């Protein structure tokens, strides 16, 4: 089918050229008999031309670009010479004029072939550069660029497309590498932080199962410690699950609404026990906006902020939750009198798995603040931190409603 399509295209183009010849002949004043005689010459020439070009196209399928250009230039001159010979035989032109035209056409052979070679060389160079660049992409060398080729608008467009594609692939590959690094960090951090509560649970269960511990007071103490270990594991799994949902874009702005007072009370209740154990005072000051509508997800945000604040506040310290309306919406702050952070740590505190403590002595995988930040941003707000040796201040702002 492709061969027939090419033959049809050649026939149409050649026929258009023949019609143009007849039109020019009519405009120059040729009579009817002369036009009929011209047609007797043109129609066979048209048939021969179409067949010659079709055969040449078949033969040149495996030829190089330079060979094709040279062949086309040479074939055009050969066909012209054949036409001149036929015209001279039919007495349309004199032998002298035919010889002169033939000499000119022979000269044109050299000019045509030279032009074909020059064009073919520049085009071949451009294609080789594109091929080399494509091979580099195949070897993941996405920094390679083709650049300007100087070989016509079509190849220039292809070059720009290659370079733009490489840029997009490079960005995608960097994101994939970053995601892979994050996954490795996740496995390392979670494996480390799960080991402590699980080892504690295993030791206590074995002690109870082996009968090493059987008095009621110790069993009660073990039960409390086992519950805290389980709560650590559950909290870590919940953080991982929600963080994965946020990364996958599965959490959208929900339509459910809660009152700010309920959200704050829920978050405070979760950390009260730990705060009492550390003798940390929890204070709330909502400035009369307890009934302000907000997302229920702010409870998880405040819970993570309060857990972090209580964990880093020494005994007899204070953690305060304050709220107010602002021009940007609803502003809630968590302020502690803890040890504070350096400027470098404050700049990275919302990164997943970041721990300012290099020894990783505290519980958790460093996901709480990262999760809080992403939830707030998913709600169209912002979460920031200010820190000094006197303590830290986390402030979140979300739109009202």
Image: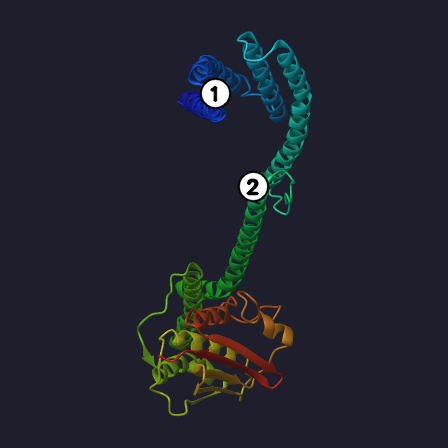
As drawn, the residue found furthest toward the bottom would be: 288
Quarter of the image for the C terminus: give it.
Answer: bottom left
Number of numbered discs overlaid on the protein picture: 2
Q: Is residue 11 left or right of residue 132?
A: left
Element at badge 1?
A: loop
Judge the density around disc 1: few (<14), some (14-19), many (≥20) Cα neighbours within 10 Å.
Answer: few
From this view, report whether residue 170 is shown above or below residue 363.
above
Judge the density around disc 2: few (<14), some (14-19), many (≥20) Cα neighbours within 10 Å.
Answer: some
**Rendering coords of residue 112 (x, y %):** 65, 24
Which of marks 1 and 2 precedes in the sequence?
1
Query: Residue drawn 53% across and 61% down?
Result: 189
In-front residue for pair 215/145: 145
In-front residue for pair 284/111: 111
Which disc is residue 255 wearing?
A: none
Q: Can residue 309 be seen in this view?
A: yes
Which disc is residue 30 wearing?
A: 1
In-front residue for pair 29/215: 29
Which residue is label 2 attached to?
A: 158
Element at badge 2?
A: helix
């Amino acid at each position: 089918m492709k061969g027939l399509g090419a033959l049809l295209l050649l026939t149409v183009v050649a026929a258009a050229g023949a019609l143009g010849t007849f039109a020019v002949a009519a405009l120059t004043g040729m009579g009817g008999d002369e036009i009929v005689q011209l047609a007797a010459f043109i129609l066979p020439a048209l048939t021969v031309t179409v067949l010659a070009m079709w055969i040449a196209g078949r033969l040149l399928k495996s030829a190089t670009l330079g060979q094709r250009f040279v062949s086309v230039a040479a074939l055009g001159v050969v066909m012209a010479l054949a036409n001149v010979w036929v015209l001279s035989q039919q007495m349309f032109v004199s032998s002298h004029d035919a010889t002169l035209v033939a000499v000119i056409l022979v000269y044109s052979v050299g000019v045509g072939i030279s032009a074909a070679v020059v064009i073919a060389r520049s085009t071949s160079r451009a294609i080789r550069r594109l091929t080399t660049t494509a091979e580099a992409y195949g070897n993941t060398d996405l920094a390679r660029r083709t650049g300007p080729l100087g070989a016509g608008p079509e190849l220039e467009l292809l070059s720009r497309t290659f370079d733009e594609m490489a840029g997009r692939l490079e960005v995608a590959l960097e994101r994939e590498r970053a995601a892979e690094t994050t996954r490795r960090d996740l496995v390392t951090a979670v494996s480390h932080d799960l080991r402590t509560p699980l080892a504690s649970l295993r030791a206590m269960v074995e002690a109870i199962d082996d009968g090493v511990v059987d008095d009621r007071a110790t069993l009660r103490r073990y039960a409390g410690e086992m519950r805290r270990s389980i709560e650590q594991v559950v909290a870590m799994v919940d953080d991982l699950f929600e963080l994965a949902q946020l990364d996958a874009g599965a959490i959208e702005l929900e339509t459910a609404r809660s009152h700010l007072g309920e959200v704050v009370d829920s978050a405070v209740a979760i950390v009260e026990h730990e705060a009492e154990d550390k003798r940390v005072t929890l204070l709330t000051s909502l400035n009369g906006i307890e009934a302000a509508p907000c997302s229920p997800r702010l409870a998880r945000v405040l819970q993570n902020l309060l857990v972090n604040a209580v964990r880093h506040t020494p005994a007899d310290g204070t953690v305060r939750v304050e709220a107010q309306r602002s021009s940007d919406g609803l502003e809630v702050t968590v302020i502690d009198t803890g040890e504070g952070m350096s400027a470098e740590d404050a700049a990275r505190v919302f990164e997943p798995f970041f721990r300012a403590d290099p020894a990783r002595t505290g519980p958790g995988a460093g996901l709480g603040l990262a999760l809080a930040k992403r939830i707030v941003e998913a709600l169209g707000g912002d979460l920031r931190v200010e820190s000094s040796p006197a303590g830290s201040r986390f402030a979140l702002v979300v739109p009202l409603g």
